[in-house]
Image: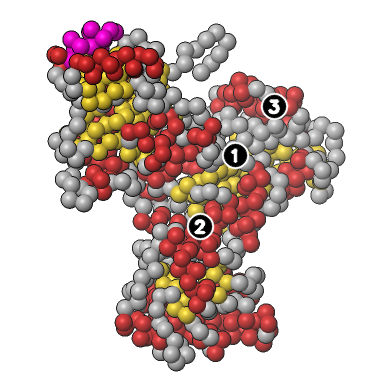
Amino acid sequence: MTGRPAGGPWEPLFDPRSVAVVGASDNPEKWGYWLAAGALTGRHRRSVHLVNRRGGSLQGVPFLPGLDALPGAPEHIVVAVPPSGVRQVVVDGVAAGARWFTVITSGAGAAAEDRELAALVTAHGGRLLGPNCMGVVDTGSDLRLTWGDFPRGEVGMVSQSGNLALETARLLARAGQGISRFVSLGNQSDIDAADALEALIPHPATRVIAAYVEDFRDGRRMARTLGAARAAGKPVLLLTAGRSEAAGRAAASHTGALVSAHATVAAVCRDAGALLLHGAGELVDTAVALLAPALPRGRRVAVAGDSGGQGALAADALTACGLDVPSLSPATAAAVADHLPPGSHAGNPVDLAGAGEADLANYVRISETLLASGDADAAVLTGYFGDYATANPSQERHECATAGALAALVTAHGRPLVVHSMARDTAALAVLRDHGIPVYERIEQTATALANAARWRAGSPEPPPVPLPAGRTAPPVPDGAYATMRALLCSYGVEFPAAVFVGTADEAARAARRTGYPVVLKAMGLAHKTEAGGVALGLRDEAALRAAFAAVRAATGAASFAVEAMAAPPHAVELIAGVRRDPAFGPVVLAGLGGVTAELLADTALALAPLTVDRARRLLLSLRGAPLLTGWRGAPPVDLDAAATALVALGQVALDHPELTDIEVNPLLVHPGGALALDAHAVPSAPVTKGHHS
């Protein structure tokens, strides 16, 4: 057994000096067999002890009856015994001097029992992975404490799904890549996703980090960890579940419907500089693109195809992913035409028109012209290359040499070349993959991966979010009604039109005389007033007000009303501004195009509170409808600073009042002279009842 160099605080998890597998088995149908067999692959590097009180052996290594039979304290214990025996193994392990535990066993106990088990370990200065996890792998240190095959590579994987990790590893292997480290999170009773990601950031063999996370625990810490990975130059490719969660939520506000858990994670990833992706296939394709020798410096792509159809479809796919397929400069077009058959058109995409079949070296000549031209930030070669030797084996050597020459272009010019080939697993494609050149079977994969690589390269992370305050900073508000929220938001600087709250038509008439016509009448106590017939606009005299009062009361049954000055400034735009309290990430600010069409348009942007005015401005300018704010078709720009200030205030209110789960201003009327909140309400958190924990 060789020694190991001194490592960081996570080395006992990934490269322990000694491992004990408790629950080892010689039966391949049991987890204990695969854990023991995997542990034994690293016995040239560390001491490996197999424990089973019934005795037996595996690969000539005898099973010991218990931890007390070991010659010394194991640094890392893997627990794969029945649930009833887990606690005793951990107790015995701690007593024996072990400090790191990986608990494979599922169903070891309820959440409280899991926390108690973790506390037992951490109280002695140790750490616990699991329970209910699939184990841990470090291919560089030959640590394989799991089931399944994890080929060696440069992608670190953190996952709450063991099977998804296996799928990812297999897809990476097919793409010529593999895993550096794998951490199965299980129940996260101690080591959680943020811990595991932090352990991968300084790991030299990990160049890209992949993660599947369902439970983010302390979401703000996770956001800071994602930002730390970005700062270290390690792309994080994140998968999570819940894209359809909003569809099944009975929201008490527009904000609640628009701020789903998935949308929140997407906003966090955007601000931290991570990539939120949609599946294992996209994750692997993107990882391969990010591991290439060069990344795109911009969004311009040159395409060369073996047929006009393939080139055109490639251009469409790239454009659909947000990339640009620009025209070539006259000089570049002329240089490309020199290598094409007479009469061919050297546009972008370039139709090779048989030039590759005539001479494989033309693939290199044309690709070099495109990469060296300065007209593009990346090049895509789409079509037949890689398949010539399949039909004509005598071409294999020439095709492989051409593949090597294509790979050399990337190093020479510092721009990526991505290959889409109808071939699969040929010698020439193996040469490309060996040089790190991404190879894809479908053009859609090619476009998505290249676009994601460009998105990561161009990302501009925001400052990391601040931790949430430990305790309450303001007295709780009694309810989320309009009158209450109006007074609260006014105290934070949000402006509203003048209003009086009334209960009768006579009171409404007196209020309108004080406020001045025209006025708006609003029924109180409704989340969506307009849809319920609870709002009457532009009432210009007392007769109109009294008629509206009778109609609104009949439609809603409301007992209280607001008489409010009618606000109709010219060139105004209706926004929605809100905050939703996410259980993992805390208050999430929403800005979007608002009014009654807020959910229909779904043009929104999110960010974690608190915001600065500059950050709030950038949020507003990121909307698809931002041109409406900056001056559309000759209209003057609205007061963005006033709208941004209102967003900042909403975020601060949410931080100061944790008893409110949703806060919403809809519409926030922003115009060239300022911003006015025309409606506001909040959703208080549900009270905790006996026997229930929120």
Q: Nearer the viewer, residue 152 or 594?
A: 594
Which residue lies under the disc numbered 1? Answer: 160
Mark 3 vs mark 2: in front: 2
Disc 2 is placed on an element classified as helix
- The numbered disc on residue 231 is none
Dot 1: element:
loop
- Depth order, front residue of 604/614: 604
Real-space Cα separation, disc 3 to disc 2, in angstroms: 37 Å
* Quadrant of the image occupied by residue 671: top left
The magenta segment: 501-512
- Direction from residue 439 to residue 223 in the image, left or right: left
For label 2, count other residues whose C-alpha is less than 10 Å away and answer few (under 14), some (14-19) or many (20+). Answer: many
Q: Hey, what amino acid is under mark 2?
A: Thr
Mark 3 Cα-neighbour bin, 10 Å: few <14, some 14–19, many ≥20:
many
Left or right: residue 242 versus residue 625 is: right
Q: Is residue 507 above or below residue 488?
A: above
**Amino acid type at image mark 1:** Gln
> Where's residue 453, x and y in %?
44, 58
Amino acid type indicated by mark 3: Ala
196 over 691 or under it: above or below: below
Q: Which mark is residue 108?
A: 3
Q: Which residue is mark 2?
A: 286
Write the residue at 47% across / 47% down. Answer: 276
- The residue depicted at 41 percent of the width and 89 percent of the height is 338
Of marks 1 and 3, which one's residue comes earlier in the chain?
A: 3
Asked whether 505 falls inside the magenta stretch, the response is yes
Which residue appears at 42% of the width and 79% of the height?
A: 368
Residue 313 in percent (x, y) is at 50, 69
Query: Could you say where residue 341 lies in the image, as x and y percent from the top left?
Result: 47, 90
Q: Earlier in the sequence, mark 1 or mark 2?
A: 1
